[in-house]
Structures are given as structure tokens and as C-alpha cells.
Image (cartoon, grey):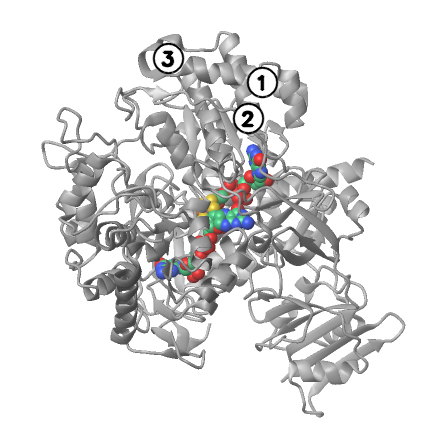
Amino acid sequence: MNLSQTPIAIAVATTQTTCPYCGVGCGVSASMKDDGNIAVKGDELHPANKGRLCVKGSALGETVDLDGRLLHPKMRGADGQMRRVAWNDALDAVASKFSSIIAEHGPDAVALYVSGQLLTEDYYIANKLMKGYVGSANIDTNSRLCMSSAVAGHKRAFGEDLVPVCYEDLELADMVVLVGSNAAWCHPILFQRIAKIKETRPHARLVVIDPRRTATCELADLHLPVKAGTDVWLFNGLMSYLAHRGARDNAFIDAHTNGLNEALAVADADCADPATVARICKVDLEDLLAFYQAFAETEKVVTGFSMGVNQSSAGTDKVNSIINCHLLTGRIGKPGMGPFSITGQPNAMGGREVGGLANMLAAHMDLDNALHRDIVQGFWASPRMADKVGLKAVDLFREIEAGRVKAVWVMATNPMVSLPDADLVQRALQRCELVVSSDVIEQTDTNAFAHVLLPALAWGEKDGTVTNSERRISRQRAFLTAPGEARADWRIICDVAQRMGFNGFDFDGPHQIFDEHARLSAHRNGDADPTKARRVLNLSGLTGMDKKGYDAMQPIQWPVQLLSDGSAAGTARVLEDLRFTHADGRARFVPTAPRGPANLACEEFPLVLNTGRVRDHWHTMTRTGKSATLASHIPEAFIDIHPQDALLYGVREGGLARVSSRWGAMVARVQHGGGIPRGSVFVPIHWNNQSASDARVGALVNPVVDPVSGEPEFKHTPVAIEEFRVSWHGFILTRHALALDDITHWTRVQGRDFTRYELAGRSHIADHSGWARRLLGVNDLDADWLEYEDLTDGSYRAVHVVDDRIDMCLFMSARPDLPSRSWLSGLFAKDRLEEADRVGLLVGQPIEKGADTGPTVCSCFGVGRNTICNAIREKGLKEVGEVTACLKAGGNCGSCVPEIKKLLVEIRVTAAV
Ligand SMILES: Nc1nc2c(c(=O)[nH]1)N[C@H]1C(S)=C(S)[C@@H](COP(=O)(O)OP(=O)(O)OC[C@H]3O[C@@H](n4cnc5c(=O)[nH]c(N)nc54)[C@H](O)[C@@H]3O)O[C@H]1N2
Ligand SMILES: Nc1nc2c(c(=O)[nH]1)N[C@H]1C(S)=C(S)[C@@H](COP(=O)(O)OP(=O)(O)OC[C@H]3O[C@@H](n4cnc5c(=O)[nH]c(N)nc54)[C@H](O)[C@@H]3O)O[C@H]1N2
Ligand code: SF4
Ligand SMILES: [Mo]
């Protein structure tokens, strides 16, 4: 860490806050260590994690330094250069341009595009500004790409966006079904809670429904590798099976639901025969029947679902087909059962509470409901109210490209990377008259097209609340002082709103905004009186908190009642009273006629592109990319493909391939082993133009959306694959930053004491030595420079040593099988190279046994694959616990346990043959 870039702690004491990554919402205790670094631990008292953190949470301390931070407002000058400006100038520019565009073209000519990574208070203010003051609903959020199908499904079934399950239900369940969720990697602490149950109650079952055999499947009793996009067939088939085999709860159906006959008729029409369903879903009939039977027999079932369900052009129907099965069996609102939408971002749920989506109002009210509009406008006393739904994310960027939306303010999201058809986003941003971006990092793919950059406070500096998947509101607390001129997101929005001449944005702190939000949730909330509208979301117990009360606020699940003694009572399970929010108080079965993905593989694009996450990175890597610990698990973008498909399409493991669709193309390294079925490829979403030359997968993704929710089909784009021909492969490890403009393909990875660049080139290099010295900037002929060249196989290596310490090294070859990076990384940690190291560098492999630890498996303790495999073989280890006892691997956050399990199995299998 650069010392001038060190964050400053507010106080020495430990601060209780919440992890800024996934929707599990783990409590974190943060404190400053003597050396100035930040120590983070799981908060023992937080009910979500009870002291545990996954690897991303554990590495938070490595991401709070100020390297790369946006610390001052900046504006693009006429020469195209970004320059630092005073806050007043930046705010005036944003406010006056927004105002003038609104005056000339109307309120719908401007837009906000916000994020589930904003705090509830930021989100509330952004929504209030657009819907109640600008008078347009053109505010949408990256939750459109994530949770909107779940929201739409909940609203159709329950009348309100309600998640009826809490985490404890996973522990009480006798069967947990995970559909389209790789929880082992994406919600690790939740997954560990599920894994733990199996230790104490071995009869409890885990079923995973995912086309890929993911890390989550390592602990599953049954994995149904459904054909991508066929979940509705599977759940309609289940509904039909349950209905006709005595598993319905008629008393519940009669008293609390509507619409069974229509929905069941639709399910029966195509899916009454399990053999047909098995054929369509491409799963083994016996496995399918085993699942159906287990579901029928098990009262306590939680069906957790995530992006494999939501991110589909039939996403909302997928959600309702799952909920239908729970309604049919009456398995909802009771301990240990229910449909469970697992949220992605830390505040996906909070954003929905304040109505951040373009079709919602605030506090679970709807834009297209006149009574709701009246309630919200009356409460805000606002000048004008949006009265029609706004543009949803994909349409919003289309309208920007078409020139009809002329100004957009992006907050806490990176649409150049994360939207489908991401090249359209680039065209849109280039065309847009005013692009404002509030971010914590300066160089992002989106910021490259901004006219105004506004520096926001980051995790550790900002203060407010987030709500996790089980509706638990937790405080994020600041423990670092505001760096540079960064300001809280809510404050920036209020500053602009006031400059636009609006009242209603005068707040002293987030506690006042939270109070307003809580009061609005309780305002005219009821059903006895026609001037009221009943919403389950009611925070009346949290109203009236001053700063002190807000600062002391403990994690609590909504709805929150105010008790007669003035205290607040949260609610573990909503819908326990089985009063749904539809006017008649009943839930709805929704008919879900099955339909496949919008575009199928074809001759030109014969494979299906599935996209998703890896264990140790977060989205576009603006924060996790800073951590060497996190970067070591999967250092490079990859294309996972079945070995037979690789053979068919002429691409080779370890080599580079180009994947292309109708919308765009990318290049990454080919790998097998990700449990991918034939006919598809899987590519991670994280790499972007900052971390690689051409690995932005969003450019390929089909922008088709679900007709109800507007959520894109991120998991299913027809693509083609071909070898990406290069004449050489190479890599550099260096203590210095490099410019790689002339290199055909590169990836940058953060190491602990170095930066690693993976390279590949097309140009013929005649003079390797001269080329290497120029690229690495080592022009001094007297430098300690070791090199070796073998003209027969085109391999070349060069090492620059300064004061006996390795400073940089470069390895090249005509083939991609280059020396081990983990061995070389180890050399950068040494203060002095030993003779054996120098010999190893020249020979291109370690001389010392065990020096090549292999790619990292356990990031917490930095334990590599080779080390684990050797120990398993040499010591005859059989259980994960033994590996942990021997090497520590898996003993901290546990995120790598499924991978260790897999290695144990692989070695056992190879030993047997
Ligand atoms: N490490 C890490 N964790 C994260 C995040 C991160 O960036 N990194 N992001 C967070 C966010 S915002 C989110 S939304 C969540 C996402 O969490 P998840 O939804 O668990 O993650 P994904 O990898 O997007 O996709 C889940 C799975 O859906 C499967 N799938 C694809 N198509 C289908 C299908 O048709 N049917 C079924 N049943 N499955 C299918 C994919 O193969 C994939 O394994 O993760 C959160 N947690
Ligand atoms: N192909 C494909 N694409 C996908 C998905 C997929 O599965 N496949 N998943 C989609 C899903 S579920 C999601 S949630 C999105 C996520 O996609 P994005 O939201 O675009 O990804 P992030 O990298 O999380 O972007 C957050 C940005 O906000 C900045 N930031 C962090 N903290 C703060 C803060 O406190 N204030 C401000 N102002 N800025 C901050 C970060 O530096 C970063 O630039 O990706 C979607 N895109
Ligand atoms: S599971 Fe990991 S990423 Fe998610 S909130 Fe907990 S510590 Fe953070
Ligand atoms: Mo997400």
C-alpha cells in the first residue's frame, strides 16, 4: 500500500458495520491495526453470519486503501481531458444542465441509473428527486438486471414484493432446493449455514438445479442439470405431480388463494407427464421423479432461487412456477418452508423498499395506482409526481442512444460492463449530452465516457442502512474519515436537488432520511379506510430515531412494529398471518405457460453463452480487483467449455479463443472442468476494459428482456467460438505499471508485491531482447538482467534484478504452457534471490521441491492446488477436515471447502484407475 494513500481511521475502537458485497448481509467488526491497516472480523453478534465471513468479506481490509480512488470532482474540458474542479462548479453544472434539458424537452429527457449498492438513504433521495420533483419515473437501477423478475413474481403472487422466508428457515428445513443459484460461491455464508445442517441432521437434503455442475453441487444430494431455460417445465411438472398425488393443502388453497384451476390447467397441459418433462429439461427421469417424490413427501421445503431463475426472458414465470408449488402445498409463512428469492447486492432489498425501480413508487407503493401516488405526494408535499412508469434499464440506454434521453446520472454501477449489448451502452454514452457518474473509483469503463465525475464515499467511510435477503436492516457505519473531497451519495443528490430549486432535500444526516423513509412506510398504511393502502412493509417501530438512536440501531427484520413501551419489534417471517396484500387478502396462482429462451442456438451461433460469477471477485472488480488475496483464485477471464465441444470447434485448453454473438465479441482463455454441459460455454462477468484488452462479456449478451419484469436474458445468448490465433504467449510480473497498447491481448492481475500481465501477440518479434527491454523500460545495459532464448521453440525469458531482489520478469513462448506463476510470485516476496532461484529463473522452473504451489485454492491462507494435491496423495488424506488440519486450507472462511472436496474425489478417482 502506498503510504500517502493510507486511509485514516475515525477512532481506534472497533466499529460494527455490514459487508458491502452480497445480499447475505454479514456483520463485520472493523478496527485499525497498529501498522495502519484495517482488520476485519465477522461480527459474532450479527444474526446473519454469527462471526463468520467469506473470503471477500475477510479481504475487505485490502480494498480500503486510496489507490485508484476518485477523490475530487472532475469535469471534461473542451479538449476531452478530465480536470479537477471545485464541488460548486461540478454541482452547478449538473443542476443547470438537468434543469435546462427538463425546461426544453420535458422531465422524461433526463434519467438516473442507480444501484443496489447504494445505501437505503441514498436510494430514497434519488427516487424522491426523480419521481416527486423532476416528475419523471426515469430512474431505474441495476436491480433491473438482478432482482426485478423476483419482484414481479412476488407482486403477482402476493400483491407485494415480499420474501416470506428467513435464514433460520434454511436450518429448519428438511429439504433445501437451490434453483439457478451457485450459493457456495455467491452467498457463501448462507451456503455454509445450509452445509452445517447436514452435519447435524444428515437426513436433510440439498437439491441443486443448475445446468452446470457448480461448487454448490459438491454438497448436494441431487443435482438436476436442467437444460438452460427449461425451469418452468420442471416446476409446472412438479405442480402437476403434487396436485395429482395428494400433496395439495386444500384447506390453505380454499382459504387463502385464488386461481388454482387456471394455473393447474396450464401446468397439466404440457407438463403432466414426467417423462416428457425429463426429455425437455434433459434430466434423467429417475432423478426427476426422485426430486418430485422428495418434494411431495417433505413438508419443510425451502426453494431458494437466484440468477439462473431471474435472468431469463421467462424469469417472472420461472419465479411464479416455483411459488405456485409452495402455494399448492400450503408451504409458506411457516417455519422451515417457503419460496426464497436470494438477493444479490448488499442493498437489493433496501432499494426495493424505497421504490428504486422505474415502475415502483416509494415504500412498496405503485406508480400506476392513483391512491398510492396521492399518499406519496401528500407525504412529500412535492410539486409534481411522475404518473407513468419510467424507462427500464435496457430501454433507458436505447433511448439515450436514440437521443431522446439527453442526460443520465449513473450512481454506483458500471453499465458499460454490466448491461447486455454493452457496446450499445458505449454508443449511448458517447451520444448523450451529459453523462454524470458518481463513483468511488476513478478509472472505470463507464467513467471513461462521463462528462462529470462526482467522488462518493466508499464502504468504511459512508453511513446508512442496508437490507439483506431476509429483510434484515443493518447499519453500515463509517470507521474511516472522508478522503479527499469525497461526499456521501445522498449528500451529492441533495446538493444537486437544492440547486435545481427543490425544497425537501434539507437533511443533516442519514438518520433524518431514514426517519422520513420509515414514516412514509407507516403513512396511511392500513385497510380499514379507503384513504389508506395496506402494505406489509411498515417501519413504524423505527420512526422518530435521532442520530444517537440511529447510530445504536441493531439489525432488525421488517416489518417493524412499535410496541406500547416504545420499543421496536421486528418480524422473522412475513405472511405468517397468511394475509396477502392483494385487495382480497389472498395469494394468486399465476398460470405459467412454458416457453424457451428468446433465441436458440443455430448454425451460425451453435453454442449457448451462460454468464455468471466466480468465488473471489465482485462484479466489475473495481474493489475486489485491488486485493492480491482475491485475485489469486482465478487470475484471468476464461471460457469454460466441454472438452468434446472444444475438440469440435478447434479450441484448446490453455489457449485463447474468441467468442462472438450477434451483438459483440470477446477473447479469453479456454478451460475445462467447470462442470459445463455440451452445447454451452460459461464466461465470468467480471473482466472489463480496465483489467483486460477484450474480455467484456456484456458486449455479447442478448438484450432481450422478460416481458413482465424487463430483466435481461443474461444466461442464454447464442454464440460461436473459434481459436484466437496468436504467434506467441507470455506473461510479465513486475513491481511497476506498464503500458501495453501494442499488445494484441492482455490481462492485468494484482499480485501482493507485483502486477501480473498475461500477454499474447500476433506480431513477429525478431529481437526479443531489445523488445523486452523496451517494454519493461530497462534501458540500462549494466542492469542486472538475466535472459535466455531458445530459437528452436521460440521461448524467451528475461529477469531484471535490482539489489538482489527480483524487480520484473518476462516469459514468452510460442505455446501457452509457460512456467508456473505461483512459483514466480513467491520470488517477489523475497528480499534476496538465492542462487537456486537464479538458476530456476534461467531454467524456467523451480529447483526447490514444493516451490510451485499451483493456482490458489484457499485464498485466506494462500494454499495452492499442488500443495493440497501433494498432501492428499502423500499423507493419504480422505476428508476436508484432514486437509484443514494439515494445511489450514478451508479453515477460515470455508469458501474453498467445495473445491477441496472436489480435489479429494478427483485424486481418489485417478488413484482407482
Ligand atoms: N463471488 C461473488 N458473489 C456474488 C456476486 C459476485 O459478483 N461475486 N454478486 C452478487 C449478486 S449482485 C448476485 S445477483 C448474486 C448472484 O448469485 P447466483 O445467482 O448464485 O450467481 P450466478 O453465477 O449469476 O448464476 C447462478 C447460476 O445460474 C445458473 N443457470 C444459468 N442458466 C440457468 C437456467 O436456465 N436454469 C437454472 N436453474 N440455472 C441456470 C448458472 O449456471 C449459474 O451457476 O451473487 C451475489 N454474490
Ligand atoms: N453478463 C452478465 N451481466 C450481468 C450479470 C450476469 O449475471 N451476467 N449480472 C447482473 C447483476 S445481477 C448485477 S447486480 C450487475 C452488477 O453490475 P454493476 O453494478 O455494474 O457492477 P459493480 O462493479 O458492482 O459496479 C458498482 C460501481 O459502483 C462503484 N461503487 C462502489 N461503492 C460505491 C458507493 O458507495 N457509491 C458510489 N457512488 N459508487 C460506488 C464501484 O466502484 C463500481 O464502479 O451486473 C449485471 N450484469
Ligand atoms: S457472504 Fe461474504 S460477501 Fe456475502 S455478505 Fe457475507 S462476508 Fe460479505
Ligand atoms: Mo445482482
Q: Residue at x 17, y 47 (%)?
A: 515
State which quadrant residue 82 falls in.
bottom left
The local crowd at label 3, few if under 14, some if 14 to 19, many if 20 or more residues have their Cα within 10 Å, is many
Q: Is mark 2 within 8 Å of ligand 1?
A: no
Q: Which mark is residue 332?
A: none
Q: Which residue is mark 2?
A: 594
Query: Which label's residue is closer to the chain start, 3 or 2?
Result: 3
Q: Is residue 251 above or below residue 784?
A: above
Q: Which residue is mark 1?
A: 271
Q: CA separation, marks 1 and 2?
A: 9 Å
Q: Residue at x 20, y 66 (%)?
A: 499
**Residue closer to the observer: 180 or 904:** 180
Quarter placement of the C terminus:
top right
Let me know if residue 215 appears in the view. no
Q: Is the C-beta separation of discs 1 and 2 under 8 Å?
A: yes
Which amino acid type corresponds to the residue marked 3 in the rendered image?
Ile
Which amino acid type corresponds to the residue marked 1 in the rendered image?
Cys
Percent position of residue 221, x then y: 59, 27
- Label 1's element? helix
Which amino acid type corresponds to the residue marked 2 in the rendered image?
Pro
Query: Which label's residue is closer to the chain start, 1 or 2?
Result: 1
Query: Which label's residue is closer to the chain start, 1 or 3?
Result: 3
Q: CA separation, marks 3 and 2?
A: 23 Å
Percent position of residue 656, x then y: 73, 58
Q: Which mark is residue 253?
A: 3
**Residue closer to the observer: 190 or 52:** 190
